[in-house]
Image (cartoon, helix red, strand yellow):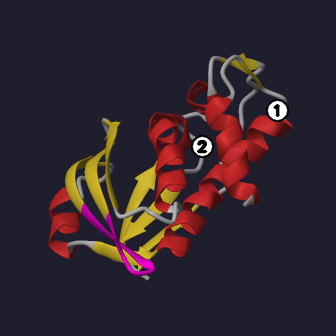
Amino acid sequence: MSFSIQAGCPAVRKCGSADDMADAVGEMYSSEAEDAILVWNLVPIRLPYGYDLAALVDDLVPLLEEVQRPGFSESEVFWGSDTFSAEWRLVREGDSLRIAARWHSTLGNYESLLAERGDSVTSVRAFVSEWKKVLRRIVADIEAESVELNDDDIFLRAKDLITA
């Protein structure tokens, strides 16, 4: 498989309330917490929960909803964290997704190596399933901490995704 994610089990800090899911993620996980690892064509990329995933979650949930729609053909997403900055173009090819990426920055400075490895191709189902592992971890931690969210839209949509 050319695309996978290891969700890990990051330690959680107390967080009573937050504006939204992204803010809760940023508050719940310290910079010393275990990272998620995205593997792109055998290149591991660290995704710190409290920083990168906090920045990605608002775009990730809508993207996962979109790629599962029957009429989905292609989409673009910009991941805008300082330590995970990339532009992805996702194109459906039958039951698969071809993900073409332009890498701007990653922890470990793997941009050149990632560019050399080229596009990642995976099934739509596997792509969604891999990201669901991360969302499942985050949603479970928010629920376990009873975090009150002022805007729970992305959180509720994430919950729907992981139960579907």
Q: Main secondary structure of the magenta part?
A: strand
For the point 15% across and 62% down, the residue is: 112
* Mark sitting earlier along the chain (2/1): 2
The amino acid type found where label 1 is placed reads Glu
> What secondary structure is marked by label 1?
loop
For the point 59% across and 33% down, the residue is: 30
- Of residue 73 and residue 133, the one placed in the foreground of this image is 73
Q: Are marks 2 and 1 in contact (CB under 8 Å)?
A: no
- Of residue 103 and residue 69, the one placed in the foreground of this image is 69
Which residue in the structure is indicated by mark 1? 145
Taking the image as shown, residue 34 lies to the left or right of residue 60, namely: right
Q: Nearer the viewer, mark 2 or mark 1?
A: 1
Residue 145 painted magenta: no
Taking 23 as reference, is 157 above or below it? below
Residue 24's x, y, as percent?
64, 27
Taking the image as shown, residue 20 lies to the left or right of residue 123, namely: right
> What range is drawn magenta here?
91-100
Q: Looking at the image, how many numbered discs can be counted on the residues?
A: 2
> What secondary structure is marked by label 2?
loop
